[in-house]
Image (spheres, helix red, strand yellow):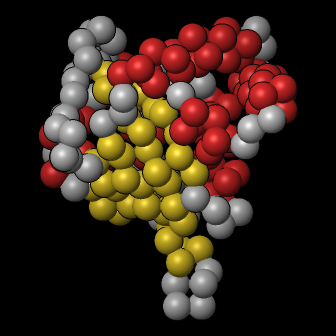
Amino acid sequence: MKERNMPLTGVERTFGEDEIIVSKTDMKGCITYANQVFLRVAQFQEQEVLGKPHNIIRHPDMPRCVFQLLWDTIQAGREIFAYVINRAKSGDHYWVLAHVTPTLDAHRRIIGFHSNRRLPRIEAVNKVKPLYQMLIQEEQKYLNPREGCQASLAKVVSLLQEQGLGYDEFVFSL
């Protein structure tokens, strides 16, 4: 997909404190719904994202291990909060505080996922950036992306254990 090959611009996009970026995906992570705030901030038209993997907006500075933690959590039927840097179609970037939840049917079976993203506090983003840089560096030590992801995930788990925090507690402590 050519959008993913757009060079990074270093330009940060933003959105209003009162706005919420919303998207929904199917079980495989393909977008089934994106609100107008999502489309405006990510610089896509609706027809460009529907049916596409949500990672169409994945920024290369976002550690794979955070997505692994997120995916494992929501597939287990639990919600998760995470700071995420996303990539707009143009190569610009934007930070969000994501709240991702499983979508359940009438029988309480997971049928998809729902994500609401708010504007994060700049102080929290400034605290998470060095951690994400360290995790990316760990991931890049490995030729195999899965091995890199597992190594950086082990660092996250160790950090949380040292601080005596769960992941959500860590996120809200920033």
Q: In this view, does 14 lie to the left or right of 51?
A: left
Residue 56 seen by the camera: yes
Please tell me how many numbered marks the rendered image carries: 0
Q: Is residue 107 left or right of residue 115?
A: right
Query: Residue 151 at x, y = what percent?
Result: 81, 23
Query: Residue 80 at x, y = what percent?
Result: 57, 51
Q: Residue at x 31, y 54 (%)?
A: 22
Q: Is residue 31 above or below residue 95?
A: below
Q: Which residue is drawn at 58% across and 18% down?
A: 132
Q: Which residue is drawn at 36% across and 33% down?
A: 120
State the image quarter where residue 57 is shown: top left
* Front in this rendered view, residue 40 or 161: 161
Q: In this view, does 80 lie to the left or right of 40?
A: right
Query: Residue 3 at x, y = what percent?
Result: 30, 27
Q: In this view, does 9 lie above or below 97?
A: above
Q: Which residue is drawn at 22% across and 24% down?
A: 13
Query: Residue 144 at x, y = what percent?
Result: 77, 21
**Quadrant, the N terminus:** top left
State the image quarter where residue 150 is shown: top right
Q: Is residue 67 left or right of residue 58?
A: right
Residue 4 seen by the camera: no
